Image (cartoon, rainbow, N blue to C red):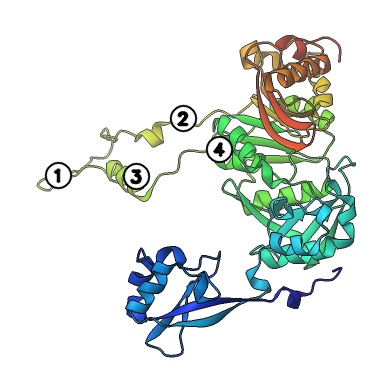
Amino acid sequence: MKELDREAFKKTVPVLGAKVPKHLVDPVRSASEVRKAVLVVPRCSSVRPADDDEHRLLLLHAQSEDELPQVTKDYLREHSFPLQPYNIQLKYDYWTANDILQAVLPEELLDDYTSRYSVVGHIAHINLHTMHAECLPWKHIIGQVLLDKIHHIRTIVSKTDSINNVYRVFPMEILAGEPNTMVTQKQNDCTFTFDFSEVYWNTRLDFEHKRIIDLFKKEEVVADVFAGVGPFALPAAKKGCAVYANDLNPCSYKYLLANMANNKVADLVRPSCMDGREFIRVIFKENYDDPMPPMPPPRLSARQRAERDRKQRPASSPTRPTSVRPGSPRKLRAPSPAEDARPSPRRQRITQFVMNLPDTAMEFLDAFRGVLHPDNADGRGLSGIYDSQEKMPRIHCYAFTRLRDEELAAAELRKRAETALGGKLVGEVTWRWVRGVAPNKEMFCLSFQLPYDVAYASSI
């Protein structure tokens, strides 16, 4: 079958039904003499209408009376519950996607395709090119079956090749459904809108995005070197962080701007569209020259605002009115804590870098070498801000490795990072396995503090 024929999936299953008064269905079905003989079929009710409204048919796991246990037959005769044949009609809607694909695909190509998709908005994305190449003649049937069986999905797309461009956008084709790749995706209390065919998005990184964002404190300044449409940047800004969000892809930048506005964080995110290495080289100076705005004050609930207003009202005596003579000293009420609080200082120190470009992010680490040296910082006083190892920003760098063992992978990634930086990592270095991308291809996150000696090295 090279074209989906839904009529081919009709099937009639003959069984027996016991005609039972409808008010006795539950006790009969649970009776020890009957219970094991009741028909059990996934997604198929064992109770069906009878030929009158006062009875129901209790379907049994048998096609003839001879197939029933003797104890069941005796029970039904004793209670005068007659047996009659019944045909269960199973149609295309009954079968799962896996059932249908097993019936359609050649045996040597059988695989659980229904577990190998990810959902982005209304799109389900599968990677047929990484499975059997021989299945490609059936790709549109696979797409149509998944479209029929995955709820709330309107489009099925397949990756046709590996990512081989600087924008991290993979080539795709629409296998079934609407030719519409504009999606809206919710993640980590933010809503993202973008064209899935123009930008990079991986739903399977949802937990990893949250894990990193949870590490940030709300007063911090975050620099996202490969920000995409903002899965790290915007939730961090919603938390209160000030964020520099950069991406080389003009389409990602376009949707980043729109998502900043839609999520009401435009005042806390400064976007840019440039090469990641250039971004690293200039962002320290930019933050020094034009610091991020101070932390926004905490939002008060209606009850807290009412309590604040009550405390700010001047006390008055009900028995003796107050008066003030011209020129006499005026008694002023004490300011409330909210009024007395000084504004938070502008945020002038970047504390976190995110580098989620696992194919090549390690190669960009060389941009940190000498980035704070006075010669490279145009004589600015950055040394007064980043004046010790403790003040250096923490870097979260993603990378691929063939090693699955976490200790071995961490040692390899650390060596690669130190080679790119041109110096040894110091202080706390942590690593985390993120996910398996393909056989012999594992994604890790290496987190470390930028070494002071590397940042102030005299040569780039």
Q: Nearer the viewer, residue 305 or 257?
A: 257
| In the depicted structure, whether residue 340 falls above or below residue 202 | above
Q: Which mark lies nearer to you, 2 or 3?
A: 3
Residue 342's label in the rendered image is 2
| In the depicted structure, whether residue 125 falls above or below residue 37 | above
Q: Which residue is mark 1?
A: 317
Q: Which residue is mark 4?
A: 240
Real-space CA distance between mark 1 and mark 2, rounded to the nearest whole angstrom = 32 Å
Q: Between disc 3 and disc 4, whose residue precedes?
A: 4
Label 1 sits on a secondary structure element that is loop
Q: Which residue is mark 3?
A: 304
Label 3 sits on a secondary structure element that is helix
Real-space CA distance between mark 2 and mark 4, rounded to the nearest whole angstrom = 18 Å
Q: Which mark lies nearer to you, 3 or 1?
A: 3
Q: Nearer the viewer, residue 381 or 100?
A: 100
Q: Between disc 2 and disc 4, whose residue precedes?
A: 4
Real-space CA distance between mark 3 and mark 1, rounded to the nearest whole angstrom = 25 Å
Q: Does the residue at mark 3 contact the one at mark 4 (Cβ under 8 Å)?
A: no
Using a 10 Å C-alpha cutoff, classify the residue at mark 4 as few (fewer than 14 neighbours), some (14 to 19) or many (20 or more): many
Q: Amino acid at mark 1?
A: Ser
Q: Amino acid at mark 4?
A: Gly
Residue at (66%, 16%) from the top-left corner?
Answer: 386
Q: Amino acid at mark 2?
A: Arg
Using a 10 Å C-alpha cutoff, classify the residue at mark 1 as few (fewer than 14 neighbours), some (14 to 19) or many (20 or more): few
Residue at (88%, 51%) from the top-left corner?
Answer: 160
Q: Position of residue 185 (x, y in %)?
A: 66, 54
